[in-house]
Image: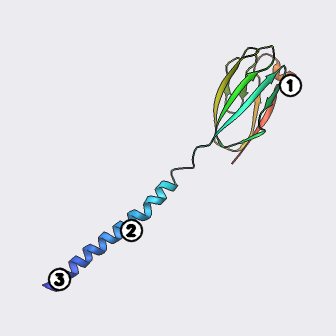
Amino acid sequence: MRLRFRRAALLRASLVLVVAAAVAGLAPARTASAGPTATVTRVTVKMYEYRFVLSVPKVRVGTVIFTVVNKGQLAHDFGIQKLQKVSPLVQGGGHTTLRVTFRKPGKYYYLCTVGAHVQYGMFGNLTVTK
């Protein structure tokens, strides 16, 4: 009888240890697979008559907050064509922000969608890296 009791107790203790080890082993994996920490980058976009000047030529995958400043006299906007994101129209001397999330690396074409401004040179490519 004692042998059966010891065997059952040993079996329960082993089971508890196996379950505890499995749970402890899974916890870090769940935390690690939750995803990379969110990257937020800030970029200043200065708009002049028929050209853009960005504060940086490339950004990392993640959220980018563009501060769009119109240094010119005519109204302009700033759009990321592939993502179909366009800032509000900014009058001369004004500014706005545009929040964009880049999920994949690559080259993203930006432009001014006002009138024929793109034909006069208001466009460029922003490089997004991993």
Name the side, left or right, on which 74 lies relative to 97. Answer: right
The image shows residue 100, relative to residue 116, as above or below, that is below
* Residue closest to the eye, 23 or 73: 73
Q: Is mark 3 on a helix, strand or loop?
A: helix
Mark 2 = which residue? 21
Q: Is mark 1 on a helix, strand or loop?
A: loop
Query: How many numbered discs sit on the rendered protein?
Result: 3
Among numbered discs 3 and 1, the one appearing first in the sequence: 3
Mark 3 = which residue? 4
> Dot 3, how many residues are within 10 Å of its Cα: few (below 14), some (14-19), or many (20+)?
few
Mark 1 = which residue? 121
Among numbered discs 1 and 2, the one appearing first in the sequence: 2
> Dot 1, how many residues are within 10 Å of its Cα: few (below 14), some (14-19), or many (20+)?
some
Quadrant in which residue 17 is drawn: bottom left
Residue extending farthest right = 120
The image shows residue 28, relative to residue 127, as above or below, that is below
Quadrant in which residue 106 is drawn: top right
Which mark is drawn over residue 49? none
Counting from the top left corner in percent of width and height, residue 35 is at 54, 50
Name the side, left or right, on which 48 lies relative to 62. Answer: right
Name the side, left or right, on which 11 lies relative to 54. Answer: left
Q: Say what amino acid the circle numbered 1 marks.
A: Gly
Q: Which residue is drawn at 57% across and 47% down?
A: 37
